[in-house]
Amino acid sequence: MSGRNGTTTFIMQRASAVLLLPLVAWFVWSVAAHAGDDLAGARLWAGKPMNTILLGAFVTVGAFHMRIGMMEVIEDYIHGGLNSILNALNWLVAIAVAGATWWALLSLPA
């Protein structure tokens, strides 16, 4: 990665953190409100359209935020050819986490 992307990375990291704030608050409130539910209740809750969208957004934005943070760690501490391989794996893990989450959520009964 070139030295010209620092500002963009900084802004993306902060923007994703700001997006996560209300999503985390919603998630914590929802988990607390449904504490003690069984698996069927949790699936019913997650299958509601608004909860599906918000839960998917929470994990997707979280995976994006994680990818940026891990990219910074990789670039700061890993040098040479391994840097490119780990950054590619970082992208793949973030995409896999977001994709698996959406697949699981959309396969729930509404």
Image (cartoon, grey):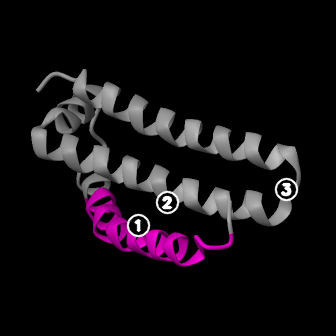
Q: Position of residue 50 (x, y in %)?
A: 12, 46
Badge 3 amino acid: Ile
Q: Position of residue 54 (x, y in %)?
A: 23, 50
Left or right: 47, with 26 as reference point: left
**How far apart are the alpha carbons under marks 2 and 1?**
6 Å
**How far apart are the alpha carbons under marks 3 and 1?**
24 Å
Q: Position of residue 12 (x, y in %)?
A: 45, 69
> Which image quadrant is residue 20 in?
bottom left
Magenta region's main secondary structure?
helix
Label 2 neighbour load within 10 Å: few <14, some 14-19, many 20+: many
Residue carrying label 1:
16
The residue sitting at 21% across, 40% down in the picture is: 52
Q: Which residues are magenta?
A: 3-29
The kind of secondary structure element at disc 3 is loop
Left or right: 104, with 64 as reference point: left
Residue carrying label 3:
78
Q: Is residue 50 above or below residue 4?
A: above
Badge 2 amino acid: His
Any mark on residue 65, and which?
A: 2
Left or right: 35, with 71 as reference point: left
The kind of secondary structure element at disc 2 is helix
The kind of secondary structure element at disc 1 is helix
**How far apart are the alpha carbons under marks 2 and 3?**
20 Å
Q: Is residue 19 above or below residue 101?
A: below
- Closest to the camera, between mark 3 and mark 1, is 3
Work out whether residue 33 or residue 69 is closer to the camera in this orientation and state it: 69
The residue sitting at 79% across, 66% down in the picture is: 76
Quadrant holding the C terminus: top left
